[in-house]
Image (tube, rainbow, N blue to C red):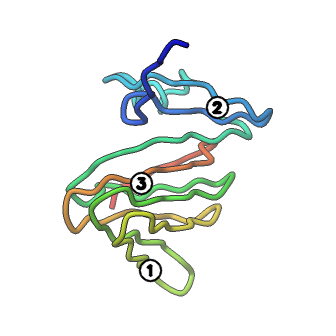
Amino acid sequence: MSNQPALQLASTYLRLGPDGMAEKLPVGPDFWPNLIAGKLGDFHHEYLVTMYTFDQNWPSWEIHPNGDEIVLLISGASDLILETPQGNQVIEVRQPGDYAFVPKGTWHTANPLQQTTMLFITAGEGTRNRAR
């Protein structure tokens, strides 16, 4: 029997396809620019699984018009802010394992209370951003 090292989500993201298959996506300095430029595909009926660590308020809002997003707290604490017709809704994610459900077509952003690591399962097709 041979041992294989585990993969790290911080360095290898995943694309979940509609056929149930997962594709490993190596993370490097060009990952986000390539994703935004469409060089990694359009994510039609696919989900992107990422993990990100941040300690400052997100500089932008984002929206995923073609599917819901799940945001799972790994460590730290954060407020996830959803823009709704009734006004901004704050979801307090405080304990590892807490998660926020971001409905399809909802603008959202985050304010960490400390250094925070979150796992994102994102319907990536058509994602847009706007400045805060």
User: Which residue appears farthest toward the front when viewing the image?
Assistant: 1
Residue carrying label 2? 42
Residue found 48% across the figure and 66% down from its top? 99
**CB atoms of marks 1 and 3 within 8 Å:** no
Q: Is residue 92 above or below residue 75?
A: below
Q: Determine whether 118 is above or below 40 in the image.
A: below
Residue density around tag 3, few if under 14, some if 14–19, many if 20 or more, within 10 Å: few
Q: Nearer the viewer, mark 2 or mark 3?
A: 2
Closer to the camera in the image, 132 or 39: 39
Could you say which disc has been placed on residue 88 in the image? 1
Quadrant assignment for the C terminus: bottom left
Where residue 23 sits: x, y (%)?
61, 25
Residue 58 lies left or right of residue 9; in this view the side is left
Few, some or many residues within 10 Å of mark 2 (<14, 14–19, 20+): some
* Mark 2 vs mark 3, CA separation in Å: 19 Å
Badge 1 marks a residue whose secondary structure is strand
Q: Nearer the viewer, residue 85 or 23?
A: 23
Q: Secondary structure at mark 2?
A: loop
Asked which quadrant contains residue 8, the reply is top left
The residue pinned by badge 3 equals: 130
Determine which quarter of the picture holds residue 85. bottom right
Q: Quadrant of residue 32?
A: top left
Q: Amino acid at mark 1?
A: Asn
Q: Is residue 70 left or right of residue 34?
A: right
What is the x, y in percent for residue 103? 62, 66
Q: Which one is earlier in the sequence, the residue at label 2 or at label 3?
A: 2
Q: Amino acid at mark 2?
A: Asp
Q: CA distance from mark 2 to mark 1?
A: 29 Å
What residue is at 26 percent from the left and 64 percent from the top?
Answer: 112
Mark 1 or 3: in front is 1
Question: Cα distance, mark 1 to mark 3?
Answer: 16 Å
